[in-house]
Image (spheres, rainbow, N blue to C red):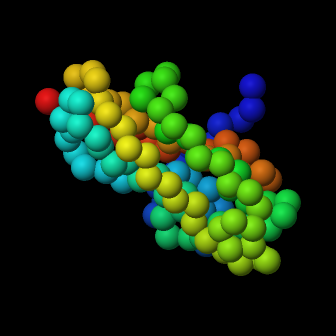
Amino acid sequence: MPKINRYVDISTVDREAKKDYIDRHSPFIHCTNKAVKGTKLPVTVKVGNEFMHPDDPDHFIESVKLYNGDSILGEARFLSGTLGGGGSKSQAEVTFHVVPTTEKLVLTAVAYCTKHGLWESDPVEIPVT
C-alpha cells in the first residue's frame, strides 16, 4: 500500500520550503455547499492552493481522482508537459460534473505526483435535497 500524504495547515509550518512542498501537492475541492438530486453539480479539484507544481518529464501531477466515500466518481490523467512543461510550474485543475443520487455527498480528492506519491484532500460534505 503506498503512503498517502495529507494536507497540513501551512500556517503552522515553520519553514517556507515545507509550506511549498505541502501546498503544491495537495488537492483542494471547490464546489457549492449544497446539491440537488439528479442535477449536475460542478466540482473543481485544483492541486495546489498558494504554490504551483513543477511539470517536468520526471516530476509532474499524473492524475487527479474524485471519490464519494469509497466510490470513484471520476479521474483525470495528465502527461508530462501538458500543464506547461519545460521546467515551468502550473496547477493541475479539473472540473467533474457529478449527478448526486444520494442524500449526501462526502467528496475526497486524491492527486498523484510522480515523485512524491499520493496526496489526499480533506473530505467535503455536501447535503443533497
- The residue nearer to you, when weighing 9 against 81, is 81
Q: Residue 87 falls in which quadrant of the image?
A: bottom right
Where is residue 26 drawn, in percent x and y? 56, 53
Asked whether, in this view, residue 10 is left or right of residue 129, the answer is right
Q: Residue 78 falls in which quadrant of the image?
A: bottom right
Q: Is residue 100 placed above or below 54 in the rendered structure?
A: above
Residue 15 in view, yes or no: no
User: Residue at 57% of width from left, 66% of height from top?
Assistant: 91
Where is residue 112 drawn, in percent x and y? 67, 46
Where is residue 67 drawn, in percent x and y? 48, 32
Asked whether, in this view, residue 47 is left or right of residue 62, the answer is left
Q: Quadrant of the C terminus?
A: top left
User: Residue at 23% of width from left, 37% of height from top?
Assistant: 39
- The residue nearer to you, when weighing 95 against 105, is 95
Asked whether, in this view, residue 126 is left or right of residue 58, the answer is left
Where is residue 20 drawn, in percent x and y? 61, 67
User: Residue at 79% of width from left, 77% of height from top?
Assistant: 86
User: Residue at 79% of width from left, 53% of height from top?
Assistant: 115
Q: Quadrant of the N terminus?
A: top right
